[in-house]
Image (spheres, rainbow, N blue to C red):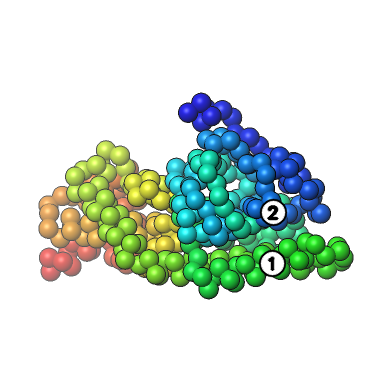
Amino acid sequence: MKAQNQSPVLFKSISELMRRLEQPKPLHPLIALVNYGNIKVPLTEVGQRFILSFYKISFKTDFKGHVRYGQGFYDFEEGGLAFLAPNQIVTTTTEDSNQSGFTFFFHPDYIRDYPLGKTINKYGFFSYDVSEALALSDKEKKIISTLFDTILQELENNIDHFSQDVMVSQIELLLNYSNRFYNRQFITSKAVHNDLIAKMDTYLSDRFDTGKSFLTGLPTVQEVSDHLGVSTRYLTDMLKSLTGQSTQQHIHSRLIEKAKDFLSTGDLSIAEIAYQLGFEHPQSFNKLFRQKTNVSPVEFRKSFYN
């Protein structure tokens, strides 16, 4: 518990991290690939937090234990990929870290002058909790293993004018495959995710039915994600994959359905309905309702009774 109260250990450079892991100096100061089997010193003591100023992609094929990332845990017993963006806090929580595979580090400056430097934020999995990391099938593991082997071979080649171009293209290929495999994970875990959506809908219905929204305001994406125990980015990516809607759009859809119930079955005024749903101003409710239905709340109520 004491370690949790300590300030996180910050590694500003990959070279600094390599020294901490008692690894050879990286061939390039902005990129490195480390075989877990060669790490003699753990990154941190158990329970100690750390922050990296660069990207980290972990490919673990055999790991017993789990790692805390944000408020969640990721169980690596089946192996897979986990992603870490710069300046995120991670806490190790197991001493028995028997693991094999690679961990890949690259600094934002390495890709800054490439299109990837501007588009890397589209890869939402860098914002996932570790508990939402990518589990790989045997076939997918072979593909990722080949990519990491290629990256390792390129790093061990003599640096020339094409080295960085080739390496950045390999990083982008790795991220694109990860995107594909995450989408597969959403689809193959559809039953589990449908339960998550049902839980979200139950929560939103309770918010609107019990008057909680009148007291607390409109439900937010962060609030819903916290209730479900998943990260906001994971929830949105999962919903888009299965329903085509973002979390915010899903919340709005449930809100509009509830508004229609109020308008068609009750005698609350438009303003009272707006406050009941959590709006501060009835005008905001009117605007959203018209935006989603192409009619005003008043017009909907009249057409329903007509």
Query: In terms of depth relative to the viewer, which is nearer, 198 or 285?
Result: 198
Residue with the mark numbered 2? 34
Q: Residue 265: where, in percent of width, then height?
A: 12, 58
Q: Is residue 45 above or below residue 120?
A: above
- Residue 33 position by quadrant: bottom right
Q: Amino acid at mark 1?
A: Asp
- Relative side of 71 to 195, left or right: right
| Crowd class of label 1 (few under 14; some 14 to 19; many from 20; radius 10 Å) | some
Q: Amino acid at mark 2?
A: Val
| Crowd class of label 2 (few under 14; some 14 to 19; many from 20; radius 10 Å) | some
Residue 58 badge: none
Give the structural element (helix, strand or loop) at label 1.
helix
Mark nearer the N terminus (1 vs 2): 2
Residue drawn at (46%, 52%), measured in percent from left and top? 75
Q: Is residue 248 above or below residue 1?
A: below
Residue drawn at (57%, 57%), measured in percent from left and top? 60
Query: In terms of depth relative to the viewer, which is nearer, 205 or 149?
Result: 149
Asked if disc 1 and disc 2 are in contact, CB closer than 8 Å, the reply is no
Q: Residue 217: where, in percent of width, then height?
A: 32, 42
Is residue 129 among what the camera can see? no
Residue drawn at (57%, 44%), measured in percent from left and top? 88
Measure the C-alpha gap from mark 1 to mark 2.
11 Å
Q: Residue 30: where, in percent of width, then height?
A: 76, 52
Q: Please give the count of numbered marks on the rendered protein.
A: 2
- Relative side of 178 to 209, left or right: right
Is residue 111 among what the camera can see? yes
- Relative side of 281 to 23, left or right: left
Give the structural element (helix, strand or loop) at label 2.
strand
Residue with the mark numbered 1? 149
Q: Residue 163: where, in percent of width, then height?
A: 81, 65
Query: In terms of depth relative to the viewer, which is nearer, 108 or 105?
Result: 105
